[in-house]
Image (cartoon, rainbow, N blue to C red):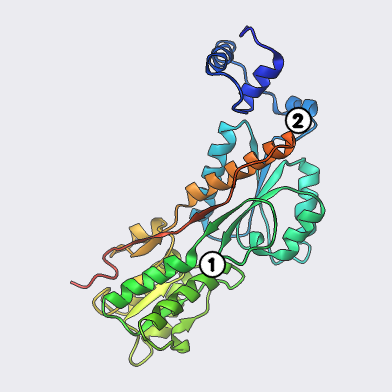
């Protein structure tokens, strides 16, 4: 109908970018007129290659997972890929084999890995040995050596900026509430907090560093511990917004005024940070955009690999931006 070859139609549908504009328009008009939709199963059989990506995660933060899924799906739909979503237990001793078996059984083209799976050398090594393509979403610069693409989130810099903001508000007695240490983001945010204190000449008090999980309950429990100290800290940097919201809840239950008596900051800019009173100072992490970059990088890598062609640098770095709200600003 478009007056072109099957190969040209294939190039248009697969968005290979090698078709002249006028030809592209004719093919797209024919697709619209015929209401043509590619058949995924037939495409996979004909090309002897899958058009399905897998998103693998172990993360209790529902807001993070939803944003990741939305971002990945948006890119998959634009590129005629399907998405298989696979929650798992990163602490399982058989996690690497589980992922390899899943890729083989579902005939996946590649995997999108978020922390902590993306930061586990034993998992990445097993995937490499089985020649499985993947893209990693990472925190910090401790990269597992690999030619495959990654998206880096600079949690260290964002945590430094939050702590520096609290210091600028006159706070010296600043507590830190951590998430699980299996997530490298926890370590990077802690290191950013410590670096800002050291830069300001403030001694690091290990008693003000509370271990926990990325949960509301950790915030509530930690607030009890911190407010029982004499004197108690005047500011808290929580490792994510959910912990920060729990800390705020615990402080208000004890009649502590936020931010006059206790300033509280979180991380991620999730709905938790905007639904509290007062709203939380945080670091805005563009999870949806991070997910889109990860999916687009993996698809571009897979296409270049199939064509045996070189590709541009597919790596990208995000620095979450400080968002100052009423939870840290004294009147």
Q: Count neighbours of disc 1 (C-alpha within 10 A) and say few if under 14, some if 14 to 19, many if 20 or more.
A: many
Q: Dividing the image into 4 quarters, which one contains the C terminus? A: bottom left
User: Which residue is label 2 attached to?
Assistant: 44
Residue 227, x across and y down, in percent: 36, 85
> Residue most toward the bottom?
230
Are the residues tagged 2 and 1 within 8 Å (C-beta)? no
Q: Count neighbours of disc 2 (C-alpha within 10 A) and say few if under 14, some if 14 to 19, many if 20 or more.
A: some
Q: Is residue 36 left or right of residue 173?
A: right
Q: Is residue 246 visible?
A: no
Q: Is residue 323 left or right of residue 260?
A: right
Give the residue at x 60% y 21%.
19
Residue 186, x across and y down, in percent: 53, 71
Q: Dividing the image into 4 quarters, which one contains the N terminus? A: top right
- Residue 1 disc label: none
User: Which residue is label 1 attached to?
Assistant: 185
Give the residue at x 71% y 65%.
121
Residue toward you, 28 or 183: 28
Residue 29, x across and y down, in percent: 54, 13
Residue toward you, 165 or 273: 165
Secondary structure under tag 1 reads helix
- Compared to 193, does 94 lie above or below? above
Q: Is residue 136 visible?
A: yes
User: Which of pointers 2 and 1 lies earlier in the amino acid sequence?
Assistant: 2
Secondary structure under tag 2 reads helix
- Compared to 28, does 241 lie above or below? below
Q: Quadrant of residue 249 in the image?
A: bottom left
Please state the total of marks drawn on the protein image. 2
Q: CA distance from mark 2 to mark 1?
A: 37 Å
Residue 45, x across and y down, in percent: 79, 28
Give the residue at x 62% y 59%.
58
Give the residue at x 28% y 75%.
168
């Amino acid at each position: 109908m478009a007056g072109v070859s099957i190969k040209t139609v294939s190039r248009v549908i697969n968005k290979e970018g090698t078709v002249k504009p006028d030809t592209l328009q004719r093919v797209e008009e024919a697709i619209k007129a015929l209401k043509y939709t590619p058949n995924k199963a037939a495409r996979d059989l004909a090309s002897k290659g899958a058009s399905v990506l897998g998103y693998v995660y172990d993360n209790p933060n529902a807001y993070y997972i939803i944003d990741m899924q939305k971002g990945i799906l948006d890119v998959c739909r634009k590129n005629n890929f399907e998405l298989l979503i696979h929650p798992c237990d990163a602490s399982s001793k058989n996690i690497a084999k589980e992922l390899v078996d899943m890729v083989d059984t579902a005939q996946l083209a590649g995997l999108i890995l978020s922390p902590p799976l993306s930061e586990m050398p034993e998992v990445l090594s097993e995937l490499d040995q089985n020649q499985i393509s993947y893209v990693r979403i990472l925190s910090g610069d401790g990269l597992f050596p690999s030619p495959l693409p990654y998206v880096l989130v600079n949690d260290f810099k964002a945590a430094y900026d939050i702590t520096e903001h609290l210091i600028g508000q006159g706070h010296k007695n600043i507590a830190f509430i951590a998430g699980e240490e299996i997530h490298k983001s926890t370590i990077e945010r802690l290191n950013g907090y410590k670096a800002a204190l050291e830069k300001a000449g403030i001694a690091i008090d290990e008693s003000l560093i509370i271990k926990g999980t990325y949960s509301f309950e950790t915030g509530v429990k930690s607030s009890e511990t911190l407010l029982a100290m004499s004197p108690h800290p005047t500011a808290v940097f929580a490792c994510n917004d959910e912990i920060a919201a729990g800390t705020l809840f615990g402080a208000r239950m004890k009649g502590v005024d936020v931010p006059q008596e206790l300033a509280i900051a979180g991380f991620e800019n999730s709905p938790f940070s905007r639904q509290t009173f007062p709203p939380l100072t945080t670091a805005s992490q563009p999870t949806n955009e991070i997910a889109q970059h990860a999916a687009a990088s993996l698809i571009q890598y897979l296409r270049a690999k199939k064509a045996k062609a070189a590709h541009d640098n597919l790596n990208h770095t995000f620095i979450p931006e400080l968002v100052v709200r009423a939870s840290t600003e004294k009147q």
